[in-house]
Image (cartoon, helix red, strand yellow):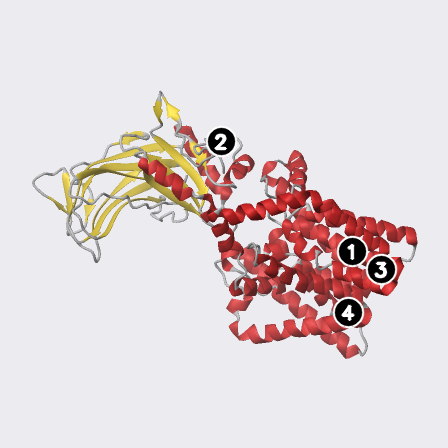
Amino acid sequence: MHTICTPPLYYAAAKVAELVVGPALGGRLVSAVAGTATIVVVYAMVTWMLGRRAGLGASLLLAVSPLHLWYSQEGRMYALGTLLVAHAALAIVGFAVEQRPLARRWWAVAFTLAALAAAYTVYSTLYTLLPLVLPILWLLWRQRRAALPLLIAAMAAALGYLPWLPQLFATTRGIARDPGALAGRTELLAATPGAVWSSLLSVGGGGGALRIYSNSSPFPWDRWSFFDAPFLLLCVVALLLGGVILARRAPLLGGVAVCFLVGTVLVALVASMFSPGYADRTILAAVIGWAILGGALCAAMRPRWVSVVGSLGCIALLIVSSDTVATLRASAMKQQYRELLADATSVSIIGYPVAPLGSWMPAFVEAYAPTLNAATIIDGKGKLILPQRDGAPVGALWLAYADNTWDNVGVVRQQLEDQGYRRTLHKYYPRPLYLDLYMRPTTQLGQNRPVDTTFATWQRSSQAIVGSNPSILRLPANPATGASATLDIPVALHSLVTLEGMARLPQTTGALTLSLSCFDASGSRLEQESNEGAADFVRDGKWHAVQVSTLCPLRTAVVRVIIRNETSEQLEFRDPVVFVNTLEQTFP
């Protein structure tokens, strides 16, 4: 949870929170408190300028904002940054409303502290802080000398950030010079039309990027296609009517709302032209502008019908956002680091090292698996360093990683294969995370389970043949359905199961599957936790050792071995051996 290219304030706050709730919850606690406090700040700011009804409407819109809720749960810096930017805006409003000179000076000091803290929390707060200079200049134009303390406060905040500017520029240059990092940022943070559109839907509460939320259920925008045009019309009316109300009753607050909603998005777009940095999370503060405009609809207005129409519009926005939140709660999924590291901790008892790869994984190991004795297998130059045992490289090792373009995990895997290791397990966890097992062909994991090497008790498709040599299984060519042989092996508890054998395959095309699947006592396949990995066979007509492994969960009663030939030539298989390692279940 630390990196030299990120401002330090959030990490300091997270470390303090860890002292109370531990590393697994420390960062998330900071975000949850910050997200909740932001609602209070918005309520105070809008109530101060437009009254309690408008303040209640704005705070409710923020409270059910899918984007705000999502990042108020994550152990990342965006919710805290948004809170501090909201405090800076509150300081501007307080300075404008307050008449006592001493109190105005204190509001100016509060702006300096909030703006500085925001800038030292996350870079994307600059997307909102820069537009907030406009309300300050407007006050300077309206109030002349009386507004000078606030201008001085803004200049003091800028001066206070100067020591960090070299780090900001170094980070930007470093990303530009690193092809992997640049490719990763471009993939996730490029300001494409699709990314901009989905982020605006997220801000408005009607939808979002499915790849961000890993959502299996459609959002209202996707589910109610007939409602798309009315929803867009509702948003336009809300923006226009809310803007008119703010312009008439609280022009300063209206300017602040525009800075949050429009200014944040525009600055993010411009900044992304130089270094990719546009995403839902980097424009999170725009939700505050949307909440202020929506809350303004609830303000008491004359004639009365305007007030009624505005209130109905605010209620409609609340309903749409609430439905999106319900969709997220029902089917959205964050990256399953906890599940991945639970398995990594369980398999570590076998005695082979577990290597977390990538820029983020070591931090999650520290948070979710502090007892895991993680191994470092890459030096500072990206060269593989194999752990040793009895003066020789270990016979197997595990890799835990996220499939990120910028982490160059593929380079590590290639170096392992060059050293004679073969991947026998490639278990997927959502968003996407992986646990891989790499073994040398001579390595044996676990206890040998007796297997019928004559294939007499195997369930074979009609095409499968056991000829004059009963120790060789021949699977004729069948690219359409695949000739196959199946064997069920009883296992108990959480287990690592490995199948080994010898296979011979001519040079041909088509798919060859060697897989293991886990089933419970009722015969239901445990799809969410089973792994089927196709072994990477050499196709040269010679016998080669093959291996494939799977991790079976606690409910497993049977492991099914499946050998299937879907190629255009006959496959031969012999000497099947199954090894089973019963693992301790470290996590419930």
Which of discs 3 and 4 lies nearer the camera? The answer is: 3
Nearest to the observer: residue 384 or residue 514: 384
Residue corresponding to mark 4: 246
The amino acid at mark 2 is Leu
Q: Are marks 1 and 2 in contact (CB under 8 Å)?
A: no
How far from the left and from the top, in percent, is residue 161? 71, 46
Q: Which mark is residue 96?
A: 3
Q: Earlier in the sequence, mark 2 or mark 3?
A: 3
Q: Are marks 2 and 3 in contact (CB under 8 Å)?
A: no
How far from the left and from the top, in percent, is residue 353? 42, 30
Which of discs 1 and 2 lies nearer the camera? The answer is: 1
- Quadrant, the N terminus: top right
The amino acid at mark 3 is Ala
How far from the left and from the top, in percent, is residue 240? 70, 74
Residue corresponding to mark 2: 372
Q: CA distance from mark 1 to mark 2?
A: 45 Å
Using residue 41 as the reference point, say whether residue 236 is left or right of it.
left
Residue corresponding to mark 1: 90
Q: Earlier in the sequence, mark 4 or mark 1?
A: 1
Q: CA distance from mark 2 to mark 3?
A: 55 Å
Q: CA distance from mark 4 to mark 1?
A: 16 Å
Q: Earlier in the sequence, mark 3 or mark 4?
A: 3
